[in-house]
Image (cartoon, rainbow, N blue to C red):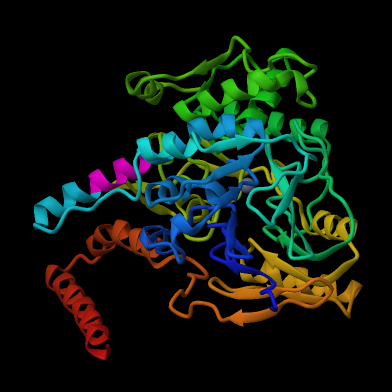
Amino acid sequence: MAKHPLSITFHGAAHTVTGSCMEFAFGGKRILVDCGMFQGSRTLEMLNAEPFAFKPKDIDAVVLTHAHIDHSGMLPKLVKHGFRGQIWCTQPTADLLQYMMADSGRIQEYDAERHNRRRDRSGEEAFEPIYTEQDGMAAWRRCKPIEREESFEPAPGFRATLWNAGHILGSASVELEAGGARVMCSGDLGPENRAFLRDPTGPKGFDYVICESTYGSRVREKVTLEERRKLLQAEVAGAITRGGNLVIPSFALERTQELLLDFDYLLREKKIPQVPVFIDSPLASEITGVFARYSEGLENTGGTNVFAYPAFHYVKDVQESMRINSMSGAIILAASGMCEGGRIRHHLIHNLHRRDSTVLFVGYQAQGTLGRVILEGAKNVRISGNDIQVRAQIRRIENYSAHADQSELLQWVDDRSPIAGSLFFTHGEPDSMEAMRREMQKRAPELSVKLPEIGETYELTAGEPAKRTATGRTDIQLPTGRDWQNAYGEFVSSLKGRLGQIHDVRKREKALEEMRRVLDSYAGAK
Ligand SMILES: [Zn+2]
């Protein structure tokens, strides 16, 4: 009897950078590599509330590449809806998940509460959180830590091995073997010269390779740790000269710790004045604790705890966080890194309008996020119901990336070659995936290169190009370009001022009437 070959279905991170989730099926068993949340624009995030495209109780195991929410954030929902298997990952990933999952659950509960307050007033039905903090903890308890480079069986018929991906603490690429096909999933790959981590590793020679392409269209100038610290030093000097605060939106996981590593150096070596550095994110503080536990084995720490410099203040409660608002000359690190939630928003409210303050971006800002809008030079933004004029200096250092650039991604693929079947590019915005395909086809014109869509299934038979057996979801139109909701926010926040510029009251009324007519014409055109 002919057995079905191994198959793969892409449930996310296809033509977009978030929502990583790949389902592998073979011999009646199913495993997921990652189960991530869609993040970025609100349109994209709505996908998180939809039911899974599979039955969670039919999934036998999860192999998790790393603790970032866009790879792990739907695990609590998976468990809530009946998944009872194990989540295989490295020990540091499991340690990080304890805090990441709980925090994500609290955010879901908070978001639902906020929605419901609004709905209460309009008499709509209550909105249930996608999952809770308790679901987050239940997911964490399903973690099964495994050493890298040690073969294991996540489900009967599947062999797997984790390899260093050099992306964040605990991160791994996943080698899988089932039905005679050898597959390598990159997970997220780090660049060379990462602060705490060694360069990615893995074996050569696969039937299928699935490679991320976040920075597939970018070649970064390579800077050393010393050069990057000089850039940071210059930004701090500029901000202190201006006199206000230096506000840095920072991902709680890894980016905050990398900055602390550099601030520890700059402060200890007296390259910058002894200004206070506030870490205003409870999650970042917890995660820094995990890093401190592993600091002996981390690169560039000199084997010491670099997170305990006396000028570092880990802010605990909201009162303490609010006291920072009246300060000047402080460095403030707060999450979220793309300014979509967290305490960074109130620091932006208090600093964006100040000409003497500086906002320094050190991380990727996805399309449609508040961070991207500010970075692109918006003059007005709307934050939590406040209209804010942007007068602060907006600065950026691009060298903190946790992602490999184009040349490093191509190098990683080369190091996994030869590829007997197909190479898939995932986890990138469309232009990045296209750029990777172009580069790859220059090098290997014969190689089958696929850019999968969400919902597509491929058959993976050893030695043969992947065969598509199910087409993608046409109902998902991923927002490309700026999300309309951000454009809306910007429009609304400038509306009153612009109406005010029309001095004749009657003309003002007429302008409003014309706007109404434009809206009606679109509603009618439906
Ligand atoms: Zn990641």
* Residue 340 x/y as whole percent: 43, 47
Quadrant in the picture for the C terminus: bottom left
Q: Nearer the viewer, residue 7 or 401?
A: 7
Compared with 303, 501 (above or below) is below
The residue closer to the viewer here, 375 or 120, is 120
Residue 155: where, in percent of width, then height?
Answer: 63, 52
Residue located at (58% from left, 41% from top): 67
Residue 357 visible in image? no
Residue at 57 percent across and 57 percent down: it is 20
Question: Height in image: 118 above or below 335?
Answer: below
- Residue at the location (52% across, 54% down)? 372
Q: Residue furthest bottom?
A: 525
Q: Is residue 47 magenta?
A: no
Residue visible at 81% across and 77% down in the picture = 464
Judged from this view, the residue extending furthest toward the top is 310
Q: Nearer the viewer, residue 106 or 499?
A: 106
Residue 373: x and y, percent? Answer: 48, 56
Q: Would you identify the image quadrant in which residue 156 lies?
A: bottom right
The answer to which image quadrant residue 14 occupies is bottom right
Magenta residue check for 110: yes
- The x and y percentages for residue 192 are 82, 43
Q: Quadrant of residue 466?
A: bottom right
Q: What is the tally of numbered marks visible in this picture?
A: 0
Q: Is residue 506 left or right of residue 287?
A: left
Q: Which residues are magenta?
A: 107-114
The secondary structure that most of the magenta stretch takes on is helix
Q: Quadrant of the N terminus?
A: bottom right
Q: In the displayed image of the protein, which residue is found farthest to the front?
A: 1
| Residue 57 visible | yes
